[in-house]
Image (cartoon, helix red, strand yellow):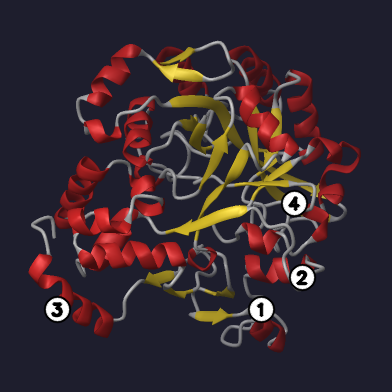
């Protein structure tokens, strides 16, 4: 069975996350987006874990479905074109902060579990180490290897995956507090690490410049802090829709079963280039080297981004054995550019978004596979051209750096004016 899975989410109990996040809200947006399998996020938080046990029903294969009342409620507000089954996998993110090899390490990891019993065991052990109630993404003073031991001891089917592996401040390969290899982080337990999450600021091609990751499967997740942003990165499977089916495909890196990923354009990620946000300094890694990695304005060290670390650790000039992936821009952002509106939350953009998925189906299908002619018929030539350019990667991006997202544009003002003149006679009422 072919399906899309977003395996890194959060709840409203995580810091800086939407207060509307719930199983019902995630189910609704799973349908809007066209995602069949969602991570629960935050199973370490006691209140969220209580909700998971109340709102989810195990279906006997390591996955869960929302209870009937939630499904019925969601289907009342989701257009029939987007109706589908949405399932959940138990997942959390843990922030490990500890000292190793004379350096402070700050590394985030994802943990996956097949059942509530395993979650209870993991939570019981982690509660002995730190406070699980203060944040849905708990901050614990535990070595990554010790965390992996707890996961392995909880169940033969529980797994740990390093999260957003290249992010400067909180990642296994991050420039500020990470490691130079998996072995340096996990030691003798490294054999149990078979996947990493690439994060928004890198893509598979960048990761395949480093031969030490040749045996590692590259997964992608949205790390979304609101339901509207789920699926901005996701995984595509063609396997049994079961917990073991998903993890077998990942562990074996079987590309007939783990088909590939949907990716952010990595330049748009918040840490792709180097720089200093406060000083408005934005550098490519080679420019940073020319300045000894110091800010020319304030003299402090630059925040060295993902591209910098990839270039530092990689041992190839050309990526090898790159898996299939497709860079996407969220549909509401594309609509906002077509309508020349700043802000995706505007009434005009939201009306157009929901009208489009009502007619054509889920967002990820519109962005990736629905024929361009069908998009033109429903949303106009300008939107169809925007989607066409997104699919081909024909966009311009001012790279993100030091916590700021990149600025992405599909059209220049001149192109927009020309295309609007061409498309005006056939422009439908949607736009």
Residue 135 is left or right of residue 362, and the answer is right
The local crowd at label 1, few if under 14, some if 14 to 19, many if 20 or more residues have their Cα within 10 Å, is many
Label drawn at residue 105? 4
Residues at discs 2 and 1 in contact (Cβ within 8 Å): yes
Residue 359 is left or right of residue 66, and the answer is left
Residues at discs 2 and 3 in contact (Cβ within 8 Å): no
Question: How far is the residue under mark 2 from the one under mark 4?
Answer: 19 Å
Question: How far is the residue under mark 2 from the one under mark 1?
Answer: 9 Å
Label drawn at residue 312? 2
At mark 4, the secondary structure is strand
The local crowd at label 4, few if under 14, some if 14 to 19, many if 20 or more residues have their Cα within 10 Å, is many
Label drawn at residue 316? none
At mark 1, the secondary structure is helix
Question: How far is the residue under mark 3 from the one under mark 4?
Answer: 55 Å
Residue at 76 percent across and 73 percent down: it is: 317
Q: Residue furthest right?
A: 188
Between label 2 and label 3, give the one nearer the viewer.
3
At mark 3, the secondary structure is helix
Question: How far is the residue under mark 4 from the one under mark 1?
Answer: 23 Å
Q: Position of residue 307 (x, y in %)?
A: 65, 69
Residues at discs 4 and 1 in contact (Cβ within 8 Å): no
Quadrant for residue 148, please give it: top right
Residue 370 is left or right of residue 269, and the answer is left
Question: How far is the residue under mark 3 from the one under mark 1?
Answer: 41 Å
| Above or below, comparing residue 245 to residue 237 in the picture | above
- Residue corresponding to mark 3: 421
- Residue corresponding to mark 1: 285
Q: Quadrant of the C terminus?
A: bottom left
In this rendering, does residue 191 appear at all? yes
């Amino acid at each position: 069975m072919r399906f899309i899975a977003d395996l890194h989410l959060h709840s409203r109990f995580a810091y800086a996350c939407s207060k509307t996040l719930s199983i019902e809200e995630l189910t609704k947006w799973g349908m809007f987006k066209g995602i069949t399998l969602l991570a629960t996020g935050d199973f370490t938080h006691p209140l969220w874990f209580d909700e998971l046990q109340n709102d989810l029903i195990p279906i006997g294969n390591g996955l869960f479905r929302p209870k009937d009342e939630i499904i019925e409620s969601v289907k009342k507000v989701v257009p029939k074109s987007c109706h589908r089954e949405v399932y959940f996998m138990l997942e959390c993110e843990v922030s490990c902060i500890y000292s190793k090899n004379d350096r402070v390490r700050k590394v985030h990891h994802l943990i996956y579990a097949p059942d509530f019993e395993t979650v209870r065991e993991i939570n019981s052990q982690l509660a002995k180490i730190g406070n699980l109630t203060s944040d849905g993404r708990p901050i614990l003073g535990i070595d990554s290897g010790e965390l992996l031991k707890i996961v392995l001891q909880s169940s033969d089917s529980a797994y740990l995956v390093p999260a957003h592996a290249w992010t400067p401040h909180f990642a296994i390969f991050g420039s500020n507090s990470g490691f130079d290899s998996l072995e340096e982080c996990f030691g003798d337990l490294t054999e149990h690490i078979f996947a990493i999450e690439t994060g928004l600021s890198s893509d598979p091609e960048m990761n395949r410049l480093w031969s030490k990751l040749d045996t590692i499967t590259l997964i992608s997740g949205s790390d979304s802090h609101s339901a509207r942003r789920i699926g901005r990165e996701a995984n595509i499977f063609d396997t049994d829709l079961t917990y073991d089916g998903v993890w077998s495909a990942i562990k074996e890196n079987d590309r007939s079963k783990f088909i590939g990923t949907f990716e952010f354009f990595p330049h748009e990620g918040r840490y792709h280039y180097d720089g200093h946000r406060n000083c408005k300094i934005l550098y490519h890694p080679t420019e940073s080297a020319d300045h000894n990695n110091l800010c020319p304005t304030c003299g402090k060290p630059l925040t060295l981004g993902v591209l910098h670390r990839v270039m530092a650790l990689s041992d190839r000039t050309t990526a090898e054995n790159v898996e299939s992936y497709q860079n996407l821009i969220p549909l509401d952002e594309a609509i906002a550019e077509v309508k020349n509106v700043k802000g995706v939350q505007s009434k005009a953009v939201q009306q157009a978004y929901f009208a489009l998925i009502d007619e054509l189906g889920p967002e990820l299908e519109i962005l990736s596979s629905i024929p361009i002619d069908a998009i033109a018929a429903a949303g106009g030539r300008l939107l169809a051209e925007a989607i066409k350019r997104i699919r081909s990667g024909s966009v311009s991006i001012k790279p993100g750096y030091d916590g700021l997202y990149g600025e992405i544009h599909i059209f220049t003002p001149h192109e927009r004016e020309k295309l609007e003149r061409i498309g005006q006679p056939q422009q439908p009422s949607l736009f």
